[in-house]
Amino acid sequence: MSPVLHEPTGRPGPTDAPRIPNVLTIAGTDPSGGAGIQADLKTFSALGAYGMSAVTAVVAQNTRGVQDVLVLEPEFVAAQIRSVIDDVRVDAIKLGMLATAPIAAAVADVLAEIPEVPLVIDPVMVAKSGDRLISDETVAVVRDRLVPRAALITPNLPEAAVLLGAAPDLGAWAVADGADADRAPVRAGTGTPATGPAEAEAADGSAGGTGGTAREADSLARMREQVPDLLALGSAWVLLKGGHLVGETSVDLLAGAAAADDAVLELPARRIATRNTHGTGCTLSAAVAALLPRHGMVEAVRQAKDYLTGALAHADELAVGGGHGPVHHFHALWDRPAPRP
């Protein structure tokens, strides 16, 4: 059966002809091309979706770090989104960096006008330095107004703890010198990224807590305990990413509020030995958004994880920057480079 794609108000309804899905990303930028909106648009294209974007913040960053951020006015962020939805059929939306509470509220206001369009939220909350990227007020808007609107949220372990009310514990994770501005974790004292395909993007600033499930999960069993609490925030599905945990595989948990028998799926993936992990969180959530108009949630997530695994496995074919470089978004489409002599 053909997938149901979504039309903006006043636009013609769907036809029987197969169509390329139109997917919108709402996020910050990365001029080095590895993360943020640039990574989202590459992912959409690689997976056969037409990409559109609304910018929330213009970020001066590269593979070594963030140099500066220019936050846009909430009204202008909303105007960008309305320019798209008033003219173009939107089949899915990916939501990334929301710099301030007013921006998050403005985005929530506009998205309330198109409740039928599936929303994938990558809850960007903690920088690689361990600093919180957004305030408690912004977290509250995301949690209370956007998460209940979402088809899927994709928190890593620190982000899950923050969503559940924990304060950041900056002692658990540290930053390697020259590390990128993305969220690839580096264990304190090791300088070694944890490069599981679903979690290489994870925030270095761990969200620790004192009791309850809000404390950052430190085991697969603890992750399982947090899944019901995350679902209780209101999203239809939760993908809790376990890449902060140690082991040869990185295990994520996928659960749906309406899933039969409260089933929680374990989705393991092998860890990839690469320094080039910049933009993996953006890439995974964007991949789900690109695939969701054509697949059910479970299949969309499985294919998105497979895509990211390939992008990480081929990341070393690129030579971008002196820090943690990007994954290879077009690994399945570009010719392989000739071996170096």
Image (cartoon, rainbow, N blue to C red):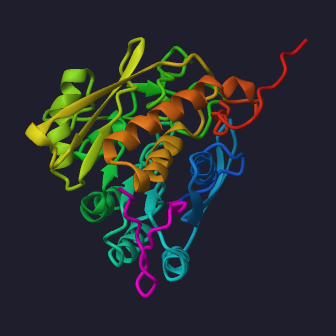
Q: Report the side of 203 relative to 39 (left or right).
A: left
- Coordinates of residue 30 in the picture (x, y in percent): 65, 51
Give the quadrant of residue 120.
bottom left
The residue shown at (23%, 35%) is 209
On the image, the x and y values in percent for residue 22 come to 53, 64
Q: Residue at x 68, y 32 (%)?
A: 325
Q: Which is more toward the observer, 222 or 43?
A: 43
Quarter holding residue 101: bottom left
Q: Is residue 22 magenta?
A: yes
From which residue to which does the magenta span run?
1-26
Q: Is residue 235 left or right of residue 232?
A: right
How would you classify the magenta stretch by its main secondary structure? loop
Residue 316 image position (x, y, % from top left):
70, 23
Question: Visible in this render: residue 167?
Answer: no
Residue 137 counted in the magenta span: no
Q: Quadrant of the N terminus?
A: bottom left
Percent position of residue 218, x then y: 27, 22
Q: Is residue 273 left or right of residue 339?
A: left
Q: Is residue 145 at least partly visible in the picture?
A: yes
Tell me the residue at 54%/65% (across/down): 56
